[in-house]
Image (cartoon, helix red, strand yellow):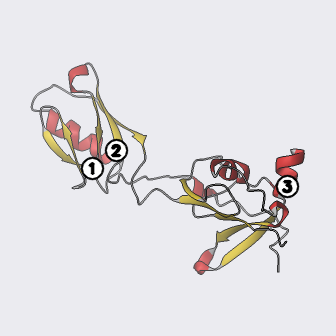
């Protein structure tokens, strides 16, 4: 059995979010230039709206930050001359974005963690509390879904990473990856 000894290909598309569509629970920082009292940090409510001082509810869900800032600017013009509005995402919590990385098997706490750019296999395993004493770390597999839903597995020599600091197999992970640490046969 065993996985591919080829290192996994990194899909930069999966890692970079070019046009991010705001979702429920995301936290937005709205800044109105020269109007600190109108500048707020707001969560996107379950109805997809945010509340902005002076103008009330604005639909943010499903829109890009640029579209939301244009809408706020447009509606503020009746109150302020030429408002400059910036919309910055300060926390991405929405489900449509939260592509997770999962760690299962002989780890202290099997977990599903939000993907962060630059995250590696080691980061994910450490977030799961490390391996248990029953683990067979050198038979660890990284499963990655490919085109058309097929899944590829890659062998990770976790023992070398943890014990010897040999980072050759400390692959970068991407959203949707599953890392499985098997138990050793007694």
- For label 3, the residue is 159
Residue at coordinates 31% horizontally, 57% vertically from top-left? 62
Q: Is residue 35 visible?
A: no
Quick check: 71 left or right of 97? left
Q: Residue 12: where, in percent of width, then height?
A: 63, 56
Marks 1 and 2 close (CB-CB < 8 Å): no
Quick check: 16 left or right of 134? left
Pick whichever of labels 2 and 3 is earlier in the sequence: 2
Q: CA distance from mark 1 to mark 2?
A: 10 Å
Q: Residue 24: where, in percent of width, then height?
A: 31, 53
Q: From the viewer's side, name the closer residue of 81 and 123.
A: 123
Give the mark toward the camera: 2 or 3.
Answer: 3
Q: From the viewer's side, name the closer residue of 88 and 136.
A: 136
- For label 1, the residue is 60
Q: Residues within 10 Å of mark 1 (few under 14, many from 20)?
A: many
- Which corner quadrant of the image does residue 89 belong to? top left
């Amino acid at each position: 059995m065993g996985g591919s000894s080829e290192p996994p290909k990194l899909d930069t598309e999966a890692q970079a979010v070019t046009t991010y569509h705001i979702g429920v629970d995301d936290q937005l920082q709205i800044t109105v230039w020269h109007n600190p009292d109108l500048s707020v940090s707001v969560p996107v409510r379950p109805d997809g709206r945010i509340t902005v001082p002076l103008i009330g509810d604005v639909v943010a869900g499903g829109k890009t930050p640029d579209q939301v800032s244009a809408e706020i600017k447009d509606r503020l013009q009746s109150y302020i001359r030429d408002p400059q509005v910036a919309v910055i995402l300060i926390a991405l919590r929405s489900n449509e974005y939260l592509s997770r990385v999962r760690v299962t098997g002989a780890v202290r706490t099997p977990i599903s963690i939000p993907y962060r750019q630059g995250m590696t296999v080691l980061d994910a395993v450490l977030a799961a509390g490390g391996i248990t004493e029953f683990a067979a770390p050198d038979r660890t597999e990284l499963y990655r879904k490919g085109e058309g839903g097929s899944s590829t597995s890659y062998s990770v020599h976790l023992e070398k990473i943890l014990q010897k600091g040999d980072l050759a197999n400390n692959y970068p992970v991407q959203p949707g990856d599953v890392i499985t640490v098997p138990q050793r046969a007694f």
